[in-house]
Amino acid sequence: MQKRFTAGWGVACLGGVSLSLALVLAACTKGDAAPKAAPANSGVTDALIAQAPDGEWLSYGRDYAEQRFSPLDAINAGNVGQLGLAWSVDFDTARGQEATPLMHDGVLYTTTAWSMVKAYDARTGKVIWEYDPKVPREQLVSACCDAVNRGAALYGDKIYVGTLDGRLIALDQKTGKVVFDRQVVPDQKNYAITGAPRVVKGRIVIGAGGGEYRARGYIAAYDAQTGAQVWKFNTVPGNPKDGFENQAMEAAAKTWTGDWWTLGGGGTVWDGITYDPKTNLILFGTGNAEPWNPAPAGRSGDALYTSSIVAVNADTGAYAWHYQETPEDRWDFDSDAQITLADMTIDGKPRHVALHAPKNGHVYVLDATTGQFLSATPFVPVNWNTGIDPKTGRPTINPEARYEKTGKPFIGLPGAGGAHSWQPQSFSPKTNLLYIPANVAGFPYFAAKDWKPSGLGFQTAIDGYTTSMPADPKVQAGALAGTTGALIAWDVANRKVAWRVDQVSPWNGGILSTAGNLVFQGNAQGQFVAYSADKGEKLWSFPAQSGIVAAPMTYAIGGEQYVAVMVGWGGVWDVATGILAHKGGASRNISRLLVFKLGAKGQLPAPPPSNAGPLDPPPLTGTPQQVAHGGQLYGRYCNVCHGDAAVAGGVNPDLRHSGAIGSAEGIKMVVLDGALHEAGMVSFKSVLSADDAEAIRQYLISRANEDKALEAKTGKRIGKGTARN
């Protein structure tokens, strides 16, 4: 039975087909008294965020409910065809761009890759100030999925950003000058911050990523004036011998087995944080259990509070309730996707609900006050469970999905990329539809044999070599055909699709809905598109020259409405999925901010020339055993950045084209000596030997020659060649 508590009691070849607790809980940190709220301030206040002016965008999801719905309607379904480019800015970093800009008092603020912050005149695009936290490029090895940042928070006269190397920084809104700069993660080796902070009653609330490393998940609140920690809630229990911080952790420990704490446990809060003023609760999503494969840590059971929605008291961080969406998660089904609050009629009754569409492929409707399960309905094909109990919300796990027990590969639907990842959804109170950027893609899970943890890189215990994409045109064609995306308008009350737009590729952008009967989304084909919110009719598009993964926003100045979106292909789908990263056709990264208004006639400059070259690898001199060993090492340490089967996306270098593979000494200089550490390629000498480096080189040569032959046979290019950093 799925159990919860009432309030007051507290990637690899994604898409490839190759191969609870009936206890009374009250949780707060030992010895902590309930802290006082920070003093009232001027500027952006709690009241202002709660009743956001129509023309401003003051927080990540625009308002506390995280609906990403704007009441502006000057741009509407009748005139959106007149939308044109008002201004644009190109960025100085060719990494994935995932931020939602903010707009207050005529200034547009945004973050870019590498946690940089920029302020522009929202009407003209003139730069007001820029700030670079100077994140070491070596931090890439501790960040799951590109050097991305999803946005900032405004409060008082400051703007706040979390950095990739785990700092919380406050800047003066007018000047960009640093007010405070604090490291807030336990360590900078296993944790990284990519999510946007939230502001709750004078505190900045944020967690961190690291669920593939040695991280113990948490969410914490920091004083907005000083950056001092006010409270912290861990999402998974630590070593029982050390005692438990609170009853919530003691109860959770009963759902774990083995030595889970040795690898942290996971459950990271890297996105998906929503404050509910009606209940004074903070609802947040948690990530996967670590490692994915439960066997090496001897893990069994539900592993609370991973892959869950958890609610805590906003003043104290005390546990209120939880609902676990994916018990015993072994598929990387993070629940960190955006959580949206809404007031609507469900089964004939008015309800204050939380709407969630996480990676596991279901739309969940929960009572936002108590966490009571109301419904869960698949919105994409699902095979990891055989059904969900309509009363308890407990899924029945498909026995074949426990791949570490079967010893066989399991093609999971959805895959590790998720049916819906971090790209924000949107809810329109005008249509009562939830707009979901969906991925339709699987993933081949296969437990690594004799796996042991190491001191560097991912610690998932998954075999990424055996399941990598083969140089077989039929297999590749099948994988590509079966890997798509969709914009789904979900009828929450009736638990069904209202309309759907099928898309060429997964990994399309987040959603904005407006009172003008519009839905805006960028996509992996490099198009920024407007649809009618009621029917899904395509009304307008603009070619952005690069894939769009970020969510748009809108604002108004002087009675004129603008729509803004960050452009720049990247993230896990690009860096890890090999040939699948290119299916959308706009995998080249050109990072920029685009701002539109009616009647504007601006144009983008021509894209810079491509630096892609033909495959011209040296001949293979290694043995089959050496190639296989190199493939295993590549699958464990390399493919998360350089792509499945050594086919890179559009952000990181494609090693099949690297000159280093032509020289044994050259590969050792890069892999072992760290010759390119300033570009983010750190030394792996702590986990790899000279013989290992040579084996990886021979694997890369083998793969390059296989693909060269395949290209000659089919006349089709595999991947897009080299990439800039």
Image (tube, helix red, strand yellow):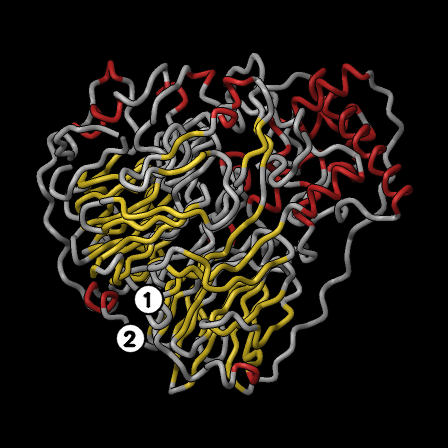
Q: Amino acid at mark 1?
A: Leu
Image point 42% across, 17% down: which residue? 297
User: Residue at horizontal 67%, vertical 58%?
Assistant: 586
Q: Badge 1 is on which residue?
A: 58
The residue closer to the viewer here, 96 or 508, is: 508
- The amino acid marked with disc number 2 is Pro
Percent x, y of residue 398:
47, 29
Percent position (x, y) of residue 233?
Answer: 24, 36
The image quadrant that residue 714 belongs to is top right
Q: Is residue 132 visible?
A: no
Within 10 angstroms of label 1, few (less than 14), some, or many (20 or more) residues?
many
| Residue under label 2 | 53
Dots 1, 2 in contact, CB < 8 A = yes
Q: Is residue 216 left or right of residue 147?
A: left
Question: Which residue appears at 45% of the width and 34% of the height?
Answer: 385
Where residue 578 sits: x, y (%)?
A: 68, 41
